[in-house]
Structures are given as structure tokens and as C-alpha cells.
Amino acid sequence: MTSVPARERGARAIDRVAAGLLIACVLALPFFVWGFRTYQLAFAATHAIAILGLNLIAGQAGLISLGHGAFYGLGAYTLAVLMRHAGVPAYAAIVAAGLACLVVGYLVGRLVARLAGFYLALATFALALAVPQMLKSSYVSRWTGGAQGLYLDRPSAPPGVPLDADQWWYFVSLGTLGVLLWMARNLIAGRTGRAIRAMRDQPLAAAAAGIDVARYTAWTFAVGSAYAGIAGALAALLLDFIAPESFSYWLSILLLVGSVFGGMTSAWGAVAGGLFLQFWPDVASMVTRDLVQPVFGVLLLLSMRWMPEGVAGMVSVWRGPIARGGGAKP
């Protein structure tokens, strides 16, 4: 008769082995797929970073944001302006983009801290509509390039590193995603994460317990926006070109779709959402090139019906019986 602790140790051992195999496969992947697929996987990592930030805002704090793409664009343009006009190295510009979005996200969070539901959604949607127009404005076109956009020179791998440009930026994007995942999981599991979830579930009770709801709202927006800014900076380097139309309100909608599909309350669900956004159009085009968007909508409806907690929730349901020893009685 197997004891419960022994079962738990066995389940943890299986998790460690599975995680090790998965990490090994992810690290080896760019050496076994052709260049364009490596490039797509790097782009999927940037999507996952942006969705991870949205999961913090919407999934953990329960704040409906339809303006996440605006911070994605702000991060991209911060990097581009610093590289083109100030000569800042690309890697330092990525960090600066995250910090810039952290500050702007905090200010926006303070402004919308008293809003909720549809009012909050409309306020953030206004941000998604305004930012592309601001980037095209004649007042800033000297730095942003206006409607024509800006071209960028993506750095290649450092001397002595036997990787091509796509492979190098795959590992840069993947490494950035790994660090931000680790930070997000620590945030969610800690005292701050518990306060944020209390604010989401019972705002009045949280305020009565001494939680500063406005402060936590602002900082949640700040951290989630910083994630989006870093993602936008990486995407700008991968594209080698940015234009205001790349960051329209539709981008915010797509990021929200990816969050819902992957699992809005899960950090790991962001990875599934990033892969979905990157590769679903390719899969749908194999069925029909004329109905990619309708098929996209049908799949989203089906996933919400059969996977209300997203891919991450479905995986948790599958892991339950395994963690309990297959459901067998001791």
C-alpha cells in the first residue's frame, strides 16, 4: 500500500523529469528546424511575454484591459528611438523600453484605479486607439518616422558564438521569457500576489483588511505594461521595422484572445497563448486561406466552451489523477 507522501514524491519526480525533457527539447529545437521556423518561435516567445503581462493584469488582478497593445507599441518605439537617435545598444534599449512602460503603466494605473468593468475596458481601449495616432503625429514624427515608420539594424550573435541571427535571437527571446516567467511566478506565489487576488475576488473586503487597492492596481498595471514593453522591443528587433499600423487596437484584441486561450490565470498559459497566436494562422490557412478569421473565431468559441480555463486549466485537470496516483485507492 503506497502512502500519500510517496505518491506526491513520485508525482514531483515525474514533473521534474518532464520539465527536464521539455527544456532540453526547447534548447535543441533551433538546431533541428529551418531558419524561418526558428524566427517564428522567437516571435512566439515575444507574444508569450506580452500575454504574461496581460495575465497579471486581467487574470490575477481581474482588471479588464483592452489597451495592452499600446504598451507593446510604446516599448517597440522606445527601443527604436533610443537605437536610431541616441545610439543606445539594443540590449540596453530593451531594458529601457521595459522601464519606460513600467512608468507609463503606473501612471495609467493610477488614473484608472477607481474604474471597473466596462468603464475600465473603455478607458484602456481609448489608449489602444490613441497611441497609433500619436505615433503618426507631426509633433513626434521627427523621432518616430511618422506613418513611414523606422528601420532597425538587429545585432547578430556576439563574435565567437556559433549561431546565426535567428538562432541567437531565439535564445535571447527564450531567455527573456524564462526570466520573466520566474519573476511572475514568484510574484503570484508571494504576499503581493495574494493581495492582488484578494483585490480581484473581494475588493471591499480587501480594502477593509488594509490592502491599498489603488496602489496595487497601479503597480499591477505597471508590471504588466513593462512586460508588454519588453515584448514590443524584442518584436521590433525581430521585424527590423516598425510602423504605427503594427500596433493598432487589433493587436490588443489578439493578445487578449491569446490570454484566454492559454489560460488567463496561469503564468505558463501565456506560453500556450503565444504559440497559438503565432502558429494558428498557418494551421488555419492549410484548411482554407479565405476563411482564416472565421475559423479563428469558431476555434475561440469552442475553446471557451470546452476549455473555460484555457490550455493551462485543461492540463491541470489532466495532471490531477496522475498526481493522485491515477485515482487508485491506497
Image (cartoon, grey):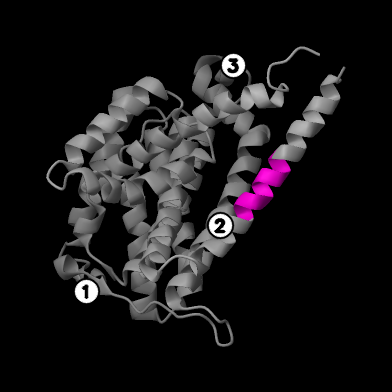
Q: Is residue 16 left or right of residue 77?
A: right
> What residue do we see at 35% from left, 38% from top?
256
The boundaries of the magenta stretch are 15-23
- Observer-nearest residue: 227 or 164? 164
Q: Quadrant of residue 152?
A: bottom left
Q: Which mark is residue 208?
A: 3
Query: In this rendering, is residue 264 above or below 179?
Result: above
Q: Residue 53, image x and y in percent?
A: 46, 44
Which mark is first along the chain, 1 or 3? 1
36 or 48: nearer the viewer: 36
Whether residues under marks 3 and 1 lie with C-beta atoms below 8 angstroms apart, the answer is no
Q: Which residue lies under the disc numbered 1?
A: 142
Residue drawn at 67 percent across, 26 percent down: 322
Residue shown at the point (39%, 77%) measured from the top left: 154
Q: Which residue is mark 2?
A: 26
Q: In the image, is residue 18 part of the stretch drawn in magenta?
A: yes
- For the residues labelled 3 and 2, the Cα–Cα distance comes to 46 Å
**Residue 275 seen anywhere in this rendered image of the structure:** yes
